[in-house]
Amino acid sequence: MPSSLSSPQLRLNLSEGSVSFSFSPDAATNLKQAIDTLMNRLKVNATQTGGKSQPQEPMEYRYTGEVFLEIFCNPNIWSSPFAAKVLITLRDERIRLNTEAELTRLIEDVNQFLEQYG
């Protein structure tokens, strides 16, 4: 558990392992809003039939703090919100992590962070 003197830590659970980093409740709220918009776009794609789906804009979330975080998802390539995955880039001056995570797991991680710190 982080102490009251340290900044809140967002923990992202990945397919193999997890990563934690300093993140603010305001940034988590912004990320949640971006995810909510993405979910709506995914639902639109999932309900369109007849092969004439309207292309949806991708989610490109960026956060710069102690680390740089970028989360990207193209809703046009996933059949449903439950199948969707996001591409995550997390870096600072010493390390860079590029990975993929399930959208549903990202949602759970952000919600848990907001429950704890928001």
Image (cartoon, helix red, strand yellow):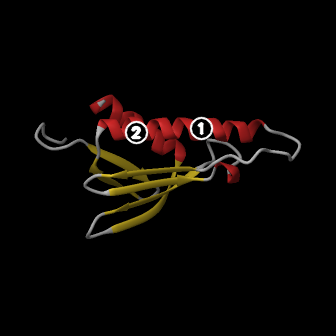
Q: Mark 1 Cα within 10 Å, few/some/many (few <14, many 20+)? A: many
Please state the horizontal and vertical placement of residue 7, each as a whole percent of the image: 19, 43
- Seen at 10% across and 40% down, the residue is 5
Work out which residue is located at the far bottom of the displayed protein and give it: 94
Q: Earlier in the sequence, mark 2 or mark 1?
A: 1
The image quadrant that residue 49 belongs to is: top right
The percent coordinates of residue 40 (x first, y second) are: 63, 35
- Residue 45 appears in which quarter of the rendering? top right
In the image, 65 versus 109, the foreground residue is 65
Give me the disc on residue 55.
none
User: Could you say whether the residue bearing mark 1 is in a helix, strand or loop?
Assistant: helix
Between the C-alphas of marks 2 and 1, the distance is: 14 Å
Q: Quickly name the residue at label 2.
A: 110
Residue 16 vs residue 33, the one in the foreground: 33
Q: How far across and how far down the image is residue 71, in percent?
A: 47, 53
**Helix, strand or loop under label 2:** helix
Kind of residue at disc 2: Val
Which residue matches tag 1? Answer: 39
Residue 4, located in which quarter of the rendered image? top left
How many labels were placed on the picture? 2
118 left or right of 83 in image: left
Tell me the amino acid under the disc marked 1: Met
> Is residue 40 depicted above or below 84 in this figure?
above
Q: Residue at x 47, y 56 (%)?
A: 15
Q: Vertically, is 19 above or below 93?
A: above
What crowding class fits label 2: few (fewer than 14 Cα within 10 Å), some (14-19), or many (20 or more)? many
Residue drawn at x 62%, y 53% as measured from the top left? 74
